[in-house]
Image (tube, rainbow, N blue to C red):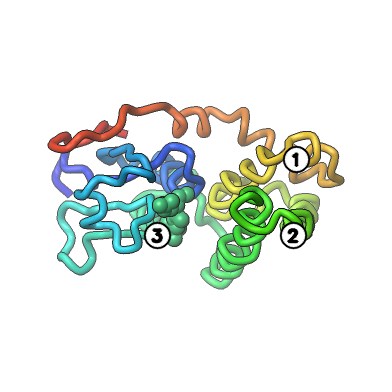
Amino acid sequence: MAEGEFPVFWSFRRCPYAMRARLALKAAGQRVWLREILLRDKPAAFLAVASDGTVPVLVLPDAPPDAAVIAESRDIMLWALGRADPQGWLFGLSSAQIDAHFDQLDGPFKYHLDRYKYASRFDRAEAAEHRRAAAEIAKVWDQRLAAQPALSGNRPGLLDYASLPFVRQFRIADPPWFDAQDWPHLASWLTAFLESAQLAAIMEKYPLWQEGEAGFVF
Ligand SMILES: N[C@@H](CCC(=O)N[C@@H](CS)C(=O)NCC(=O)O)C(=O)O
């Protein structure tokens, strides 16, 4: 990649998938042209590259056409960390461990979180059951955090930063309920993230992208 020639990163500030991709881009020191969009008013230029219409999407400037678009947040994280991993986010993690964690996080945890958090869009009566199912998974993570400082091992890495934006959402849905649960390790792990400079850095606000603009250097 020539100097100054950054990938384009289509983003939505509060989207947890876009958040985890931004966390990895920052950790890797990978600069991008950030283009902030509204999900209810997606620009044509975004839809032209986003095969499933979801953020985040990373468009590489110098890749062959069939490899130029990375449309899954997990793949964006792995791409960025594959280029540079100065904080050791991948240290000690096997691909089996990574797969197992993402399968649980992006599968059942996200499924139940959505049906709890957006209960009005789904069946309100079932929201409590979905909250219970999501909490069961969170409790497993709490137990892991009781045994080691981070989900990734001795320090926060890929598994932690991939999950934290979603656990943050879980808490936001009902903070008093979340704070009353018996998951002390998960709670302090989340608090450390909420108070971190890393979170502040990726939650900076950018104006919406306008047609013809390159974006903002992130
Ligand atoms: N598989 C995608 C999922 C991304 C996703 O679902 N993003 C949501 C926002 S958080 C989205 O763009 N939804 C499209 C919409 O709301 O129109 C990934 O991991 O990157």
Task: Please rate how many residues cluster around mark 1, counting C-alpha atoms within 10 Å: few if below 14, some from 14 to 19, many from 20.
Answer: some
Camera sees residue 154: no
Residue 80's tag is none
In x, y percent, where is residue 195? 62, 28
Q: Is residue 89 left or right of residue 189?
A: left
In x, y percent, where is residue 31? 29, 39
| Residue type indicated by callout 3 | Glu
For marks 2 and 3, give the one nearer the viewer: 2
Q: Is residue 107 left or right of residue 184?
A: left
Query: According to the image, label 3 marks what residue?
Result: 72
Query: According to the image, label 2 marks what residue?
Result: 126
Quadrant housing residue 51 = bottom left
Please tell me whether mark 1 sits on a helix, a strand or a loop. Answer: helix
In x, y percent, where is residue 59? 24, 53
Query: According to the image, label 1 marks what residue?
Result: 187
Q: Quadrant of ligand 1?
A: bottom left
Of residues 187 and 53, which is closer to you in this image?
Answer: 53
Q: Residue at x 85, y 39 (%)?
A: 180
Of residues 203 and 53, which is closer to you in this image?
Answer: 53
N-terminal of the pair, mark 2 or mark 3, is: 3
State the CA–CA distance, disc 1 to disc 3: 28 Å
